[in-house]
Image (spheres, rainbow, N blue to C red):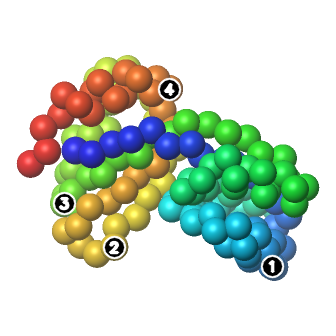
Amino acid sequence: MDYSIERQLTVALANQPGVLAAIGAALASQQVSIEALSVLDTIEQGVVRIVTNNPALCKEVLVKQGFYVIEADVLAVSLTDKPGKLAVFCQALADAGINISYAYGSVPSAGQLTRLMMRVSNLQKACTVIAALQED
């Protein structure tokens, strides 16, 4: 099971047309690629979490755009897309006393690898748990 620790940036933004497009365009103009994205909405604002190929430059671009940026390390885990795989992985973290605050991910097509971004309560311990799991 492949995993890494990635730097995630979180930004609150106005929940209105074009705001996410403007962020995407600003990042693209600086050759920053978005590798993972989560967008949550509330009544008045949206919350965007992004992992990019260049978190420092991404933060710089977003701050220049007037956004307040929160940084955090997240766990990026590649799981084989098959029934029960997520359950086994999450149970291993739970057995180690590790809480998952949130997660987001996707899979290109059935049977391929799912890449999950996860905010966990103990990042180093989670890495130890993952290293102990055997990929089928």
- Badge 3 crowding class, 10 Å Cα cut-off, few under 14, some 14 to 19, many 20 or more, is few
The image's mark for residue 18 is 1
Which residue, given by chain and number where applicable, does mark 4 sit on? Answer: 121
Residue 40 or 67: which is nearer the viewer? 67
Mark 3 residue element:
loop
Which residue, given by chain and number where applicable, does mark 3 sit on? Answer: 82
Measured in 3D between alpha carbons, the distance from the residue under mark 4 to the one under mark 3, in whole angstroms, is 26 Å
Q: Is residue 86 above or below residue 96?
A: below
Q: Horizontally, is 53 left or right of 105 in the view?
A: right
Three-letter residue code for mark 4 = Ser
Mark 4 residue element:
loop
Which residue, given by chain and number where applicable, does mark 2 sit on? Answer: 108
Mark 1 residue element:
loop
Measured in 3D between alpha carbons, the distance from the residue under mark 2 to the one under mark 3, in whole angstroms, is 13 Å
- N-terminal-most mark, 2 or 4: 2
Q: Residue at coordinates 61% horizontally, 37% vertically from top-left?
A: 72
Three-letter residue code for mark 2 = Pro
In the image as oriented, which residue stretches furthest toward the left?
Answer: 136
Q: Position of residue 128 (x, y in %)?
A: 29, 24
Q: Residue at coordinates 46% horizontally, 23% vertically from top-left?
A: 122
